[in-house]
Image (cartoon, rainbow, N blue to C red):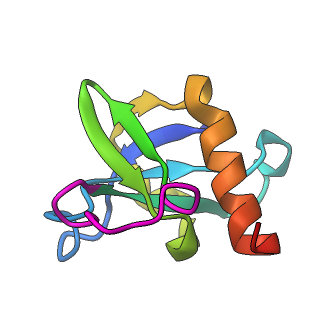
Amino acid sequence: MAQFDVYVNPSESAAQGIPFVVVVQSDLLDALATRMSIPLASIEFSEKSPDKLCPMVMINGQPLRALAHYAAPLPTRSLRQLVGNLAPQASLLVAAMDVVVSGI
């Protein structure tokens, strides 16, 4: 499981508006049983989100918003279906987490 891998949202109840999650946790922490993840929401679900906090990313041609303020640890075992990787867009995700931590 690599940093910035994208998985199908393991929460069936939230999957309609938030179809995917992206792992932002460093690969150096692979021994942990959880992965810090950011939900990736459909544009319709997250229309009024601020760009710095919720950057737009693309997964398989689908635009989504990364909801950094909802980042949370998920059990590694729940992340089953890999759909892509956002490493080329990593700077957007790291900047969004910086906004959560520092406010700027």
State yes or no: residue 65 in magenta: no
**Residue at left 51%, top 60%?**
38
Count all numbered tags in the image, as a single digit. 0
**Residue at left 63%, top 59%?**
35
In the picture, measured across the screen, residue 11 lies left or right of residue 77, that is: left
Can the viewer see residue 4 in this picture? yes
Query: Which picture quadrant has residue 53?
Result: bottom right
In the picture, measured across the screen, residue 44 lies left or right of residue 8, that is: left
**Residue at left 39%, top 67%?**
49
Vertical comparison of 4 with 40: above or below:
above
Q: Main secondary structure of the magenta part?
A: loop
In the picture, measured across the screen, residue 101 lies left or right of residue 78, that is: right
Vertical comparison of 50 with 26: above or below:
below
* Residue nearest the observer in this picture, 17 or 48: 48
Per the rendered image, the range of residues in magenta is 42-54
Image spot of residue 98 (x, y percent): 76, 61
* Residue nearest the observer in this picture, 36 or 88: 88
